[in-house]
Amino acid sequence: MTNLLPNLLDFTLEEMEAFISSSGKEKYRARQIMKWLHQTGCASFDAMTTLSRDFRGKLSAIARIYRPAIVKIQKSQDGTQKALLRLEDGLFIESVLIPGKSHWTICLSTQAGCAMGCEFCLTARQGFKRNLTPAEIVGQLITLKHETPDGANINNIVMMGMGEPLANYESTIKSIQILTCDFGLGMSNRRITVSTCGLAPQIIQLGKDICINLAVSLNAPDDETRNQLMPVNKKYPLATLLTACKKYPMPGRRLLTFEYILIDGVNSSRADAEKLARLLKDQRCKLNLIVFNEYPGSPFKSPSAKDVEAFQQILLDRHFTTMLRKSKGGDILAACGQLSGAVGNGYAVCLWD
Ligand code: SF4
């Protein structure tokens, strides 16, 4: 049974200040507690030694600290690490650590399962279980940062793991506020990317509420193909989605990213590349091409290297910044659209340099 006391990892600084004030203590204690939780990775009140013993005792009677617990970590040959994490109610989620040249990127899950039903995605197969709380989203990072040898060097966050972040809108926004708080981890908003399958109204709202990098999982050059791959397109077709993308204010002079998983015989022909270039001609964007990761029983195939090269070249010729992203962690099913939170076999997420 889940403990019903409030979890301090769910709180933004303002919420923590209000909570601490209501307990009769000075507001500045909230900052100390945020630092203990996020910067030191404290998992118990006893370890918060700048607080008096009395106050720690009082806190433990009115609040709790809970974050996802590591069940196992699988390591890929390319250095990618996939963590299976257990939530308080016994559900499982996955987070992925992706090595870069000098730092690590963490791919966070925002839901247990997903309701969006994208055809190429393993997470979709398990259906939707529930939204994650801010503590469960932020807690993935805190746990891996403080409990794995490589976690200390995480300085990039992508919300591309299990679930659709914008379908869990409030928790996603609150998590970003906590992650960027100076008394939390103080992450830069330029180092956090939210990825969406294309919830157009929420994209517009996100642009009004917060300044953060946005990646849109596009995967098709026309509505007919996208309707087959991504049911969300029937609700928000490409014209609606791209209008929302055009209005989205990216931080600084950054470009919105369109992700495009190349699938043999579905969306990766030369004609598809030409169509895609026409579709995106008015967008300030860059393109990440990802070759589909085949997995046991997958309904789709990867295109040949020659087809991938031709696809990319057509976009480069049309002056699109186009990167061919190596999907990492394929051998541990930690690659794009492959996270399932399965205990035992374990499938995984989206990763790039
Ligand atoms: S690709 Fe993303 S949005 Fe689509 S089903 Fe998978 S987790 Fe959900």
Image (cartoon, grey):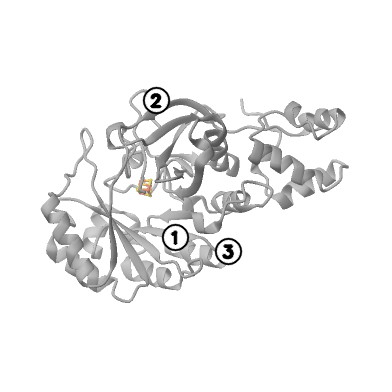
- Tell me: residue 254, above or below residue 20: below
Whether residue 131 appears in this view of the structure is no
| Quadrant hosting residue 285 | bottom left
Label 3 vs 1, first from the N-terminus: 3
Which label belongs to residue 343?
2
Q: Are marks 3 and 1 in contact (CB under 8 Å)?
A: no
Other residues around mark 2 within 10 Å, as few (<14) / some (14–19) / many (≥20)? some
Compute the Cα span from label 1 to label 2.
Answer: 31 Å
The structure residue drawn at horizontal position 46% and vertical position 44%, both measured from the top left corner, is 103
Q: Which residue is mark 3?
A: 209
Other residues around mark 3 within 10 Å, as few (<14) / some (14–19) / many (≥20)? few
The image shows residue 304 at horizontal and vertical percentages of: 12, 49
Callout 1, which amino acid?
A: Leu
From the viewer's perspective, is 230 left or right of 270?
Answer: right
Q: Which residue is mark 1?
A: 214
Label 1 vs 2, first from the N-terminus: 1
Label 2 beta carbon within 8 A of ligand 1: no
Other residues around mark 1 within 10 Å, as few (<14) / some (14–19) / many (≥20)? many
Under tag 2, what secondary structure? loop
Callout 3, which amino acid?
A: Asp
The structure residue drawn at horizontal position 66% and vertical position 29%, both measured from the top left corner, is 3
Q: Which label lies toward us, 3 or 1?
A: 1
Callout 2, which amino acid?
A: Val
Under tag 1, what secondary structure? strand
Looking at the picture, tell me which residue is in the foreground, 18 or 152: 152
Q: Are marks 2 and 3 in contact (CB under 8 Å)?
A: no
